[in-house]
Image (cartoon, grey):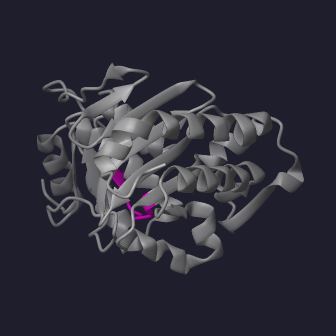
Amino acid sequence: MIENNETIDEFLAQHAADVEEAVRKAAAAEIMPRFRQLAAHEVDQKSGPHDLVTDADRLAEQYLTEALGSLLPGSVVVGEEAVHANPASYDAICGDAPVWIVDPVDGTRQFVHGDDGFCTLVALARHGVLLASWTYAPARDQLATAVRGKGAFLDGGRLQSGAPDPGRDLRVATSHPDYTTDEQKQALLGLWTEGVQPRACGSAGLEYLAVARGELDSTAFSWEAAWDHAAGILLVEEAGGAHLTRTGEPFRITGGNDLPFTTARDAATARRVVELLSGGA
């Protein structure tokens, strides 16, 4: 537990492993026992057929809410399912207290269909600044972590996103059309050009991990929900990457971004993708 005179940096130095343990335990207790074992009554729709929630989402978020709150007294948790139930709780991201941003099962659609391409996302932020993140793919037994100013790691090995190979088409994961407005669809059409290979994204958290690993060059996403982006954005940043909105400013987890926005392996790629999203040649 954090003491009154302990800073967030000191908390992370002493308790980052405890956060990792909580993430692993939540997955072991509530997610993996239901993987490829879901009954029909354990799956519901939220906004539509592509927006699913399961008992694993709800129960893993409850587990993490209790565990993370206990580790850092005075912090608050903003979780996807809690915000769905009470949208006003999202405002805590802009508050003064340290905030845990949680997506218990990122890639619920994949999880429901028995695909291993899902993960649990946790990020710690304060005053809109991302401080640390955990990306855990339990079915693949992969854990990626990042602490601001201290680098990004996958299973203990440092991540370096690098730069795309010169002359090779840019590989870009983009938002599913169901989650885009007409204006955003038009912007994303800018990626359908020579020298770019766009494709629909899967789990946002795993797409960010692919960028941090240098396996994917960029993402182009059209929604702001912090639980989908917070962990991955810091992971990419700490691996040497960059993120930009169409105004040329970094993405803000507090909202108000010009969408779509990009996260990329390096700053030059981010600028190139933003040009395409803004109608540049």
Residues drawn in magenta: 218-226
Residue 53 or residue 90, whichever sits in front: 90
Residue 44 or residue 181, whichever sits in front: 44
Which residue shows up at 65% across the image and 73% down it?
A: 85
Q: Residue furthest top?
A: 157
Residue 273 lies in the magenta stretch = no
Would residue 197 be visible to someone looking at this image? no
Which residue shows up at 14% across the image and 50% down it?
A: 271
Quadrant location of residue 258?
bottom left
Quadrant location of residue 172?
top left
Would residue 2 be visible to someone looking at this image? yes
Q: Is residue 91 above or below residue 79?
A: below
Residue 168 or residue 202, whichever sits in front: 202
Left or right: where does residue 92 sit relative to residue 272? right
Residue 163 picture location, percent across and down: 17, 29
Q: Is residue 129 above or below residue 142?
A: below
Left or right: where does residue 262 sit relative to residue 267? right
Residue 134 or residue 52, whichever sits in front: 134
Residue 247 picture location, percent across and down: 16, 67
